[in-house]
């Protein structure tokens, strides 16, 4: 007979305890304010040899603990900080530990698409579980199959509801808006986004030519002439793909262009590229903190929507054992 782990009443996990690493303190504070639960004290020390050390200020024995830590740049520091904090909580006998990861690193390394390469997203999932997480919570994974890399339960959420609500208000001021998926890999999510806005969809087709490792935007599938355009993707990294998409739709006669994404990675010269592009606005979220100097370069072009109420409500429902799907009428 298979052995089943006994279920526990959610009340037996005790009170909510919120902890945060050093990666996204502003978001953690907003979640704390939403829940009316203070952030628990901890010390995170970086020794001269670059080793990290974590110490809790108070016991979490038997408590329902949520660790808020995004894993954006510096990726390895933030990831190790998360893992060490999870193990610290496990060794202190926390009742249940949930890793709240607004942005999950290595999510693009989700398959073997060439010989002799790793599937690092699976490795990251294994490390999070082994470190001590009983559950995980994240937003807009690059690929849905990453959920299968975890053997612990989790809530894979989307911030597109937040972005859609904002864009729906803006839509009333646009001329014949059309949603453009930045590449065909985002086609399905782009179509869902367009349907939510009751707008048509167009797609940018990209291919690699010759020995060039970077794909080039070749053509646009759909009509954008004399229309306002919303270019959408799950993240903006270097802004290379977005730049190509914006240039292409402009060549095809687009009017105003808006860029929308969940995760503002903004690597390398991304902010400089965005500042120079003929776009009216960049609408994103705070899953990844944007340094003030980058915000200043984009000035009024940048609009940041907070995911704190979404994560806060899901944390509350997870603690109380209530459905998360009800939030989205699912």
Image (cartoon, rainbow, N blue to C red):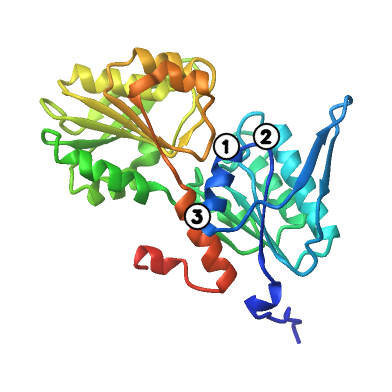
Residue position marked by numbered label 3 in the rendering: 34
Q: CA distance from mark 1 to mark 3?
A: 42 Å
Location of mark 2 (residue): 117
Secondary structure at badge 2 equals: loop
**Mark sitting earlier along the chain (2/3):** 3
Marks 1 and 3: CB-CB under 8 Å? Answer: no
Quadrant in the picture for residue 61: bottom right
Residue at x 75%, y 40% (from the top left corner)? 81
Q: Quadrant of the N terminus?
A: bottom right
Quarter containing the C terminus: bottom left
Q: Residues within 10 Å of mark 2 (few under 14, many from 20)?
A: few
The image quarter in which residue 21 lies = top right
Q: In the figure, is residue 200 to the left or right of 1?
A: left
Left-right relation of 71 to 256: right
Residue lying at the far bottom in this picture: please name it. Answer: 1
In the image, is 307 to the left or to the right of 68? Answer: left
* Cβ atoms at labels 2 and 1 below 8 Å apart: yes
Labels 1 and 3: the sequence-earlier one = 3
- Disc number for residue 113: 1
Q: Position of residue 15 (x, y in %)?
A: 67, 68
> In the picture shown, does residue 264 fall above or below 91?
above
Image position, residue 300 (x, y; %): 33, 23
């Amino acid at each position: 007979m298979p052995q089943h782990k006994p279920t526990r009443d959610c009340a037996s996990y005790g009170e909510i305890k919120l902890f945060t690493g050093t990666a996204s303190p502003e978001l953690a504070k907003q979640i704390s304010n939403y829940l009316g639960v203070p952030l628990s004290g901890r010390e995170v020390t970086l020794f001269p040899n670059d080793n990290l050390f974590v110490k809790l200020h108070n016991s979490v024995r038997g408590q329902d603990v949520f660790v808020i830590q995004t894993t954006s740049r510096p990726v390895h520091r933030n990831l190790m900080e998360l893992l060490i904090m999870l193990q610290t909580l496990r060794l202190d006998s926390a009742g249940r530990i949930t890793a709240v990861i607004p942005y999950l690193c290595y999510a693009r390394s989700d398959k073997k698409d060439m010989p002799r390469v790793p599937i690092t997203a699976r490795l990251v999932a294994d490390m999070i579980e082994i470190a001590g997480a009983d559950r995980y919570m994240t937003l807009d994974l690059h690929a849905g199959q990453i959920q299968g890399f975890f053997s612990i339960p989790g809530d894979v959420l989307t911030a597109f509801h937040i972005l859609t609500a904002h864009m729906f208000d803006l839509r009333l001021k646009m001329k014949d808006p059309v949603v453009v998926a930045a590449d065909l890999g985002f086609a399905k999510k782009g179509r869902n986004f367009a349907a939510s806005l009751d707008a048509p969809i167009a797609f940018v087709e990209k291919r690699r030519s010759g020995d060039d490792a970077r794909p080039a935007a070749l053509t646009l599938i759909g009509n954008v002439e004399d229309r306002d355009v919303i270019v959408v993707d799950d993240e903006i990294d270097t802004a290379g793909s977005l730049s190509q998409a914006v240039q292409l739709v402009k060549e095809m006669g687009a009017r105003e262009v808006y860029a929308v994404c969940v995760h503002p990675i903004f690597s390398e010269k991304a902010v400089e590229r965005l500042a120079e592009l003929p776009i009216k606005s960049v609408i994103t979220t705070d899953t990844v903190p944007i340094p003030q100097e980058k915000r200043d370069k984009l000035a009024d072009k940048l609009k940041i929507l907070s995911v704190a109420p979404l994560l806060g409500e899901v944390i509350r429902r997870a603690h109380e054992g209530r459905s998360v799907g009800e939030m989205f009428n699912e």
